[in-house]
Image (cartoon, grey):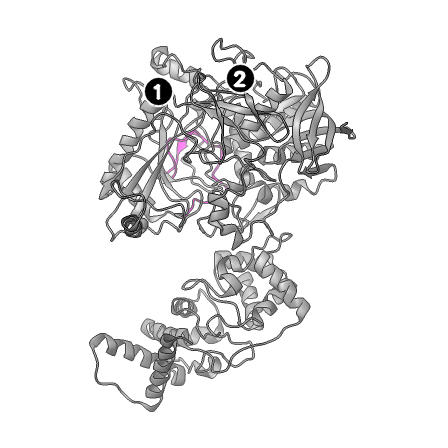
Amino acid sequence: MPQRLKEVDVVCVGMGFAGSILAKELAASGLKVVGLERGKDRHSVPDFQSPQIHDELKYSVRKAFMQDVHKEAMTFRNTHNEVALPMRQWEGFLPGTGLGGCGVHWNGQAWRYQAADFIYKTHIEQRYGKKILDPDLRIQDWGVTYAELEPYYDKFEYLIGAGGKAGNLNGKIQPGGNPLESPRSREYPNPPMKEQYAGALFRKAALELGYHPFIQPSANMTRPYTNTEGIALNPCVYCGFCERYGCEQFAKASPQTVILPKLREYSNFELRTGAHVLKINLDSTGKKATGVSYMDEQGREFEQPASLVLCTAFILNNIRMLLLSGIGKPYDPLTEKGSVGRNYAYQTQSYVPVFFDEDIHLNSYMAAGASGTVIDDFSVDNFDHSGLGFIGGCYIMSGSTGARPIEFHPTPPGTPRWGSRWKEAVRKHYNHTAIFNLSGTSTAARQNYADLDPTYRDAWGLPALRITYDFPENDVRMSKYVTNKASEIAHRMGAKTVVNEPRVRPYSTTTYQSTHNTGGAVMGNDPATSVVNRYLQSWDVSNVFVVGASAYPQNSSYNPTVTLGALIYWTADAIKNHYLKNPGPLA
Amino acid sequence: MTRLAYMRNYAILFAAITAVFGFRLATGAKTAIAATNSAQVGAQLVSAGNKKGAIACARCHGYDGASDGSGAFPTLAGQSAYYLTAQLRNFASGDRQNALMSSIAKGLTDEEMQSVAQYYAAARPTLPVKRQGQPDLVARGQYIATEGNLPNRVQACISCHGPNGNGEPPAIPYLSGQYKHYIQVQLLTFKKGYRKDVQMGNVGHRVSDEQAAAVASYFDQLPLPNNQ
């Protein structure tokens, strides 16, 4: 018999960026807030301190910060007529666990999306007509515009101390920044990161080819910074251990370094770690949530009543929580009825390894998670797609996030994969190889979705989330086109060998590509094609908000975290200024 | 001591003797001569200074780089030549402000700076250094140095200064076995801007005087990294 706890105003399911910021905003409004985190409590000191935090075997190979695959995993298949199998180790993407969530182990690449992203369907159809779209594609508008989100982007960037150079200030193009970005209302709070040598070579070649290189925006601090919550961060030392690691320097923006110290000052906020939420409870009408049920680490079950439930977990867990709780109608790919799990998308990554002569010393280990020189010329719809036969695009970046010894050993084609010749090639190429990273749009498609697995269950006896995904043909054509453009830049840099590796089907979860899963509980203005309204409020249960990249109707070229940050503050404002005054549907 | 280290120390001693007694080596390959000249220049400066305002380094830092034990002057023995050269350049340019060292550094050519830096990089204390601190202060310092301090957001010293504070040469100096008064004063000079460094300036602002004393006491009682 679950123990029923005292009712609170708000419960957050998951304490990453979304849970931490929303909890703080609502605690500051005087509400009693409980944050439930299934993982451990953890802090910059002592949990992220070196030398142990630089244990590449523990964190990169064995993935110590990720969800325990023995207790809970997703099942995966490429198409709906296959049998999905459970993931037994994390490779393709890395769902985190523990206080701070993915905000601890991200790289800090701090991108905004473009104005066109938020009205993607309208924009594409206006520019090219409907015929450019493959029949399987299901792109749609977000229900919120860039102009509406701009103040919230700004707010999040000043929270996380983003470093960069504005390229477009209120419509005026600025030298040194990204001239293709959508207008921002003021400069970044901090200057850009230092440029790596591979980035400098890339910059020169890109300029010669008529492109617009700039330094990637970053949430790794570029100078001492005190953020908008009064929390001080330290400058990054370019140690090369960002992704998959915590930051010992208080230099990478994460909930621990930008918001949790403030949140924990509120006596009306309570954090409970080791609290694994099983489901959101509904009343007899199914239209109102009464709270959540969770199990602690001793296996005791609790019911936490709450007036407002915020689903603030990783996107896959947000989708699963809705499905487990019976909120909304599950998506059926055959009839296209139902919306929960619909428009699951990803990030279409590709790489171009660029091998230089041995007199070019790149020192790629001198790096931060967001180090990189980029061109935005082939992102989203920044170039004319007429006659190309696809929509979308990639940014092209030359930069290293660390070149750590176990993970980074590029060898040119034809090198054996083991033995003395492999070792010789690794020695020869380690310091003379750049890897271009192409981060691309992921176009939502009818056949890609998430639902509950009929066979596999987790350690709590609940059905696993089943992902059905493969790259739509559109995205494969897109990747081929932009990867070729990247190879041209590489040749221009004077590379000895350039390897062109566009993304091809099938998608495989056995090699790392990106943790940027999106969609499945998408936002919009039509309940038939979205799960939450433009304020991320559930259409079906109005006292549930689902806050995460699960809300993205399709994915843009860019890394998703800063857009999520904008949506978090957008939602917080909607709850504080509208919902609390008159609880009920906001749209 | 490894054979190589032994030979290196022997070479320094020899160089020092030749410098002191004014011997000159007249044979050897061209590069060997250059190296010997540099070692001679370093030893000469250490023992006698030059006529352009650089007083003999040994007067404060000793021939062995262990300095006079007061803590007013840092141990230089075994610190990387790159780091020591950079400090001399900073003293000369004013990026690092110190009334005594600035006038000395201004009297050195860049080659002289490198020579004297190499001398002390290769130097080893003649007597093993082992000091003791107040146990409770050392324990507090050890925690901050190895784990950091959450409330005022100080990262562990060893994150950059290496395990046991043994340094990450060439750029990052060792702290283990360094005099506590010197470490304390340096944290203050970083805080006040007399030494300019983004990272350490930030740390200088973060730590309290009490924490600086604790950290300094911890490193003070550790052995020098290359003195085992």
Give me the C-alpha separation between circle 2 and circle 1: 25 Å
Kind of residue indicated by mark 2: Gly
Prevalent SS, magenta region: loop
Place of residue A3 in the rendered image (x, y in percent of width and height, measured from the top left) = 77, 30
Chain label for disc 1: A
| Residue A119 % position (x, y) | 45, 19
Q: Is residue A537 left or right of residue A403?
A: right
Residue A235 appears in view: no
- Work out whether residue A505 or residue A586 is closer to the camera in this orientation and state it: A505
Which residue in the structure is indicated by mark 2? A524
Query: Compared to A145, does A55 lie above or below?
Result: below
Q: Which residue is outermost to the bottom?
A: B21
Q: Which residue is drawn at 53% across and 15% down?
A: A331
Name the mark on residue A473: 1
Which tag is nearer the camera, tag 2 or tag 1? Answer: 1
**Residue A525 vs residue B54, the one in the foreground:** A525
Residue drawn at (71%, 37%) of the image: A269
Q: Quadrant of the C terminus of chain A?
A: top right
Task: Say which of A510 and A389 sits in front.
Answer: A510
Residue A426 in percent (x, y) is at 31, 49
Please report the bounds of the magenta region as a residue range.
A170-194
